[in-house]
Image (cartoon, grey):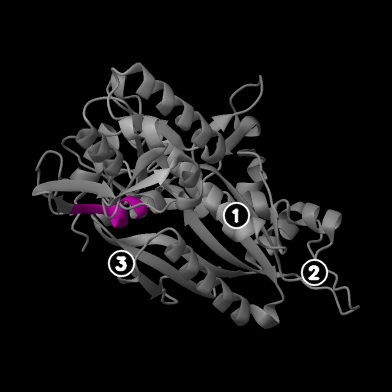
């Protein structure tokens, strides 16, 4: 189990501007979270890295951005309208509602009453709304998408007709999804609004095992890339009795979160379930015509599915470190250069010397132009600045002092080792790269 507790993560996230409770000034809204300045930068860096690793660097994956609002037939065909449910129970005394599989049914955790729950009932997790200036009836009913995958499946034929790619090929997208969770909990681990990174990889079913193994290794490489230690990740082969009915094989990548060992991401072989459903409801062919003249067939699909919030929570957990520097305890985030909200913090040794501040501003502007994620900090003494930079995961601190004015050198401090080096101003860029 990770040494970091959930309370420590939540406290750091709010105190340093990573993640705030949603609608906090009005008392909050359960299951919603707002990303602060550092949080959105971390989140954006992670999403951009995912795009680069899984899509930009490959020639067999096509990018997509499907609409959040979709024709209700999409969710009828996919089975979400009928089967996308959780078991709900209600306490007859306090009337709080819970997921039946996540609560001790012998005693209500809210009011303490024993044996007070109703029988479990299926509760659909999709948010409903109505579209257009019409009476709110079934003809105007639509849903906020509970996943991004169906947007990919509904555009499969569009990509096929326009680009006519060879198999195997994939379509990937990132975007918001919404689920009306009965009991959102554990910080950002389970919330009602979240972001997904998903790829549907269309294959010849005769080669599904090779493609599945390829994606297993890619996911392992991805976990390593974002700094998740192998001893905190467990690959769990899902038994047939626990798999989704459309899946022929599923591997869940679980992570040792502060809340316990829970699912981080998943890899599923969905067979031809989704394209077959689209054919059935839309009455349009989804067949793939091989370029070598072989008989047309319905491709099967392998789906690697990533949750952004769970990835961020895992990254924060894995990077949260406590050590001792000069006899004092230090908390720092050991984030990679690719994920850290800020790569560099720049500031003058003291802020009441005009010439130091001017030189520091000059170096700050130059580095920001080159690296982008550079922060200015001239508050308090240099020791406190270092501690602030460490706690938000900034890899390097550049301090401009009186020697800078004399010989053109600055102090560059490394976050992990706390080692400081004197470098010439024009050496900073190559050193950090």
Q: Give me the residue at 37% from left, 45% from top.
A: 396
Is 322 on the left-hand or right-hand side of 48? left
Residue 291, placed above or below residue 4? below
> Can you tell which quarter of the image residue 394 is in?
top left
Task: Name the side, left or right, on which 248 lies relative to 278.
Answer: left
Residue named by callout 2: 166
Q: Which residues are magenta?
A: 315-322
Element marked by disc 3: helix
Residue 268 or 15: which is nearer the viewer?
15
Dots 2, 1 in contact, CB < 8 A = no
**391 is within the stretch colored magenta:** no
Density class for disc 1 (Cα within 10 Å; few <14, some 14-19, many ≥20) is few
Mark 2 / mark 1, whichever is N-terminal: 1
Q: Closer to the camera: disc 2 or disc 1?
A: 1
- x and y percentages locating residue 184 in the rendered image: 32, 43
Vertical placement of 12 versus 285: above or below?
above
**Crowding near the residue tagged with mark 3, few <14, some 14–19, many ≥20 C-alpha atoms within 10 Å:** some
Q: Main secondary structure of the magenta part?
A: helix
Question: Mark 3, mark 1: which one is toward the viewer?
Answer: 1
Q: Which residue is mark 1?
A: 52
Which sits in the foreground, 354 or 294?
354
Q: Kindly identify which numbered label has been placed on residue 232.
A: 3
Q: CA distance from mark 2 to mark 1?
A: 21 Å
């Amino acid at each position: 189990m990770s040494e970091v507790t959930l309370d420590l993560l939540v406290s750091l996230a709010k105190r340093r501007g990573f993640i705030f409770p949603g609608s906090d000034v009005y008392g909050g809204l359960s299951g919603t979270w707002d990303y602060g300045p550092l949080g959105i930068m971390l989140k954006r860096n992670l999403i951009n890295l995912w795009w680069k690793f899984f899509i930009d660097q490959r020639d067999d994956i096509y990018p997509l951005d499907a609409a959040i609002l979709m024709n209700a037939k999409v969710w009828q065909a996919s089975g979400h309208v009928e089967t996308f449910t959780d078991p709900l129970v209600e306490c007859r005394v306090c009337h709080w509602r819970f997921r039946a599989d996540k609560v001790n049914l012998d005693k209500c955790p809210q009011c303490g009453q024993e044996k007070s729950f109703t029988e479990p009932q299926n509760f659909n997790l999709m948010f409903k709304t109505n579209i257009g200036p019409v009476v709110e009836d079934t003809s105007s009913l639509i849903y906020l998408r509970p996943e991004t995958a169906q947007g990919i499946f509904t555009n499969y034929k569009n990509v096929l007709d326009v680009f006519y790619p060879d198999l195997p090929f994939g379509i990937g997208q990132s975007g918001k999804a919404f689920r009306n969770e009965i009991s959102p909990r554990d910080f950002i681990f389970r919330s009602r609004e979240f972001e997904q990174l998903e790829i549907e990889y269309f294959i010849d079913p005769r080669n599904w095992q090779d493609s599945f193994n390829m994606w297993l290794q890619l996911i392992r490489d991805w976990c390593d890339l974002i700094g998740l230690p192998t001893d905190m990740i467990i690959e769990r082969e899902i038994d047939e009795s626990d798999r989704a009915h459309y899946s022929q094989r599923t591997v869940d990548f679980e992570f040792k979160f502060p809340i316990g060992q829970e699912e981080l991401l998943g890899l599923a072989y969905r067979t031809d379930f989704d394209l077959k459903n689209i054919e059935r409801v839309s009455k349009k062919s989804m067949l793939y015509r091989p370029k070598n003249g072989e008989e047309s067939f319905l491709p099967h699909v392998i789906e690697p599915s990533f949750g952004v919030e769970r990835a961020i929570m895992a990254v924060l957990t894995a990077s949260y470190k406590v050590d001792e520097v000069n006899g004092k305890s230090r908390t720092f985030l050991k984030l990679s250069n690719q994920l850290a909200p800020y790569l560099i913090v720049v500031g003058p040794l003291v802020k009441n010397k005009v010439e130091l501040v001017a030189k520091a501003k000059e170096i700050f502007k130059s580095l920001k132009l080159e690296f982008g994620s550079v922060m200015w900090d001239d508050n308090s003494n240099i020791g406190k600045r270092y501690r602030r930079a460490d706690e938000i995961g900034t890899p390097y601190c550049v301090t401009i002092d009186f020697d800078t004015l004399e010989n053109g050198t600055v102090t560059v401090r490394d976050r992990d080792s706390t080692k400081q080096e004197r470098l010439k101003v024009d050496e900073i860029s190559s050193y950090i790269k």
